Image (cartoon, rainbow, N blue to C red):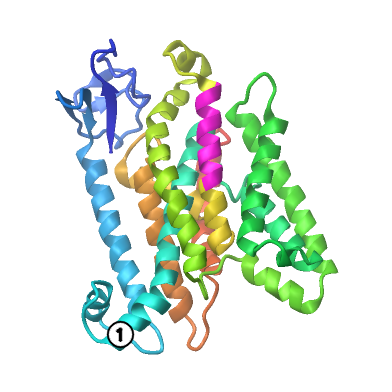
Amino acid sequence: MTDLLPSGHGAPDNGVHDPSVSGRDAPGRERGRPPGQSARRVPFRLAVPPVSGVLRPRLAGVCAALAAAAFLMFCWGMSVGDIPYSLTEVMSALLGTGDPGTRLIVQELRLPRALAGLLVGIAFGISGALFQTITLNPLASPDLMGITQGAGAVVVAGIVLGWDGALSTQALGLLGALGAALLVYVLAWKRGTTGYRIVLVGIGVAWISTSATDYLMARGERFEAQAALGWLVGNLNGREWDQVTPLLHALAVLAPTALFLGRLTRTLQLGDDIARGLGTRIHTVRAAALLTGVALAAFATAAAGPVAFVALAAPQIAQRLARTAWPPPLAAGLTGAAMVLVSDLLARELIDGTELPVGIVTGVLGAPVLLWLLVRAQRAGSGG
């Protein structure tokens, strides 16, 4: 929520460190920002630790509101089921008080699913923000650039070909996502990488992985295909601590890394030449951000399957709520969490007696966002 610059390093106080600031041409309006994207900023400097930066009150307020909304959906989701509970009973059970039967149902049966939805949304949201920042493309996300498709292809191969006996579905999804990301990066490398090449190569890898998945689905038996399809659409049904714990540990490391890289990647919005002139190691920063985004998407996909459109829509929604010139990672993660939790609640309550996979609902809700982004890019005369 702040742009931190170490003091005493000769950092110019002219806004160069922030790509969204390129001078002022009117009071309260910054050149380079679309109308309505100007935001109040409060500079600060601390003696211990020796840091200075700019606090954005609107961004802080948006993050607080999104966190409150996500927590409300988190608790609400645990109150719904065959035995309904009030929000007060859920909160008491989470704190270890209240009826023992309620504590058992909430903590052991419903908490893993709710926590999986919360963490998956955060991971996909932050991952999408990193992808869109380093590629300078609002259409860039793991589910459009081959990452989740690669995970799906390997998982389906494991189910159809019998590999899932040695490796779990979660491990196969993780390996598939990381393998697809490595393939994208190697194919996009030509004396370095650019966001444009990464997007194009990623789309190609996505189609290759999708074709492989379709072939394996057609080759598999009926029950194998059903098992694979249940994972491919993105699903929180039956989540247990075995799926939640690895994602929780991964987020504890990757989320702070992403927030730290967020400040470095914003210089890439000025173009490679200017970013290099400002001292940014563009290839190192881009590779680190890409690896972090891929790891977040890989662990989220391994935990719940490729939940569609969250990584695409959450950063764009967060950017417009915060009125920043880039997708803010923290706000994007909180938006993703709220999206997944709301979608899971709708998936369970939309049709009586049926629990839809959460990926179906996020796909229905996210498709209009994709169409809006495409129309907006076409009107702007660019590819995004």
Magenta residue check for 291: yes
Residue 293 lies, with reference to residue 13, above or below; the image says below
Locate the N terminus and report the quarter of the image it occupies.
top left
| Res. 136 in view | no
How many C-alpha atoms fall within 10 Å of the one at disc 1: few (<14), some, or many (≥20)? some
Which one is nearer the viewer's eye here, 18 or 379?
Answer: 18
Residue found at x 64% / y 72%: 230
Residue found at x 64% / y 41%: 181
| Disc 1, SS | helix
For the record, the magenta segment spans 283-295
SS assignment for the magenta stretch, majority: helix
Q: Position of residue 235 (x, y in %)?
A: 55, 69
Residue found at x 40% / y 58%: 337
Which one is nearer the viewer's eye here, 43 or 298?
Answer: 298
Residue found at x 30% / y 85%: 102
Image side of residue 154 versus residue 76, left or right: right
Which one is nearer the viewer's eye here, 358 or 168?
Answer: 168
Residue 295 lies, with reference to residue 189, above or below; the image says below
Q: Residue furthest front?
A: 166
Residue that mark 1 sits on: 102
Q: Position of residue 84 (x, y in %)?
A: 33, 87
Residue 210 lies, with reference to residue 236, above or below; the image says above
Residue 114 lies, with reference to residue 183, above or below; the image says below
Hey, which quadrant is residue 52 in on the image? top left
| Res. 90 in view | yes
Locate the C terminus and report the quarter of the image it occupies.
top right
What type is the residue that disc 1 sits on? Thr
